[in-house]
Image: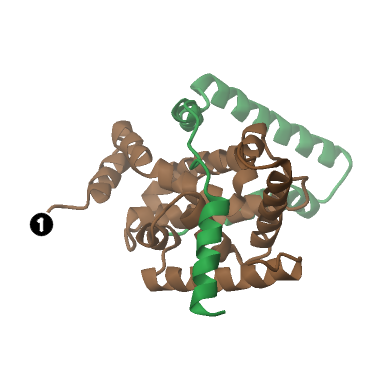
Chain colours: A green, B brown
Amino acid sequence: MTSSDDQRMDAWLARTMAAEPPRLTPAFDRRLDERLHRRLGSGARWTLGLYAGASLAASLWVMRSAALDWSVITGAVLIPAALLAVVSRYYRSTIPP
Amino acid sequence: MSADPDAVLVARSREGDERAFAELVHRHRAPVFRLAASILGRGCLAEAEDVTQDVFVRVHHALQTFRGDAQFGSWVYRIAFNQALNVKARMRYRAPHLPADVLSAAASPEGSPYQQLHESRQAQALDDCVAELPEVYQSALRLYYWMGADVDEIARLLAVPANTVKSYLHRARRLLRGLLQERGHDEL
């Protein structure tokens, strides 16, 4: 491509692509503020903790009732927990240092 | 010599000063949004705003791990670039969405209907061809021609030297010309 071709292309692109530059909507700051402060209250954290504890206890009781070996039960509990940890770690690693 | 204002705000944010973080957002939200829009394209401004939100939420969570090796702005723009690419990859198989205001902005109020049709076909061909370019070329082209950013601003956003941006733009124009000619737009 010669220099004059490049200049012609430059002028054509400037004409064809020119448009109003995009702008954030006025609700941007409010939405971001809501997302940043969307945290669980202490009541919700307690409820969630109790639910997790009760679920674990119920799972253990069911698995023991089914006469599963303790090594199987330990695997059934620890493998999903390890997967969760790996996924969470991967998510954090996508943020550059 | 005065301290980097971003570094001061980052230090205050790490100590829990929410106003300092709000100031960081205020300083960088527009460039992050422009960068995201330049990657996602004209029909995806709502998605670009969502990317901008996601970037600042991630930055807020990761501020304690920011080592300060790079400037805060470069760090945020790198997160934005990666996040926008991830969103674009997820959107690849979705039907493109062009809001009415984009379509009406593309239509010229002047000229004959034939000329308008010709221009709208050219603009559509251009959008299609730009989408075939490497991501950094697309981003540089949109920032330069659509948003009117200068070479230095594009260099900051893409974290490359200014000469590299000039080279991106030159190569992008050359590739685009070839792609458009393949589609029968020989007048370029």
Asked if residue B83 shows in the view, the reply is: no
Q: Is residue A56 above or below residue B116?
A: above
- Please state the horizontal and vertical placement of residue A5, each as a whole percent of the image: 55, 73
- Please state the horizontal and vertical placement of residue B61, each as a whole percent of the image: 45, 43
Residue drawn at (42%, 59%) of the image: B154
The quarter of the displayed image where residue A46 is located: top right
Residue drawn at (44%, 54%) of the image: B77
Residue drawn at (78%, 51%) of the image: B93
Look at the numbered disc 1 and give the secondary structure of its residue: loop
Residue that label 1 marks: B1
Furthest residue toward left: B1
Give the camera-side residue of B63 and B130. Answer: B130
Give the camera-side residue of A70 and B75. Answer: B75
Asked if residue B174 shows in the view, the reply is: yes
Furthest residue toward front: B112
Name the image quarter holding the N terminus of chain A: bottom right
Furthest residue toward top: A43
Furthest residue toward right: A66
Specify few, some or many for label 1: CA neighbours under 10 Å numbering under 14, 14-19, or 20 or more.
few
Q: Amino acid at mark 1?
A: Met
Residue drawn at (76%, 39%) of the image: A60
Give the camera-side residue of B121 and B157. Answer: B121
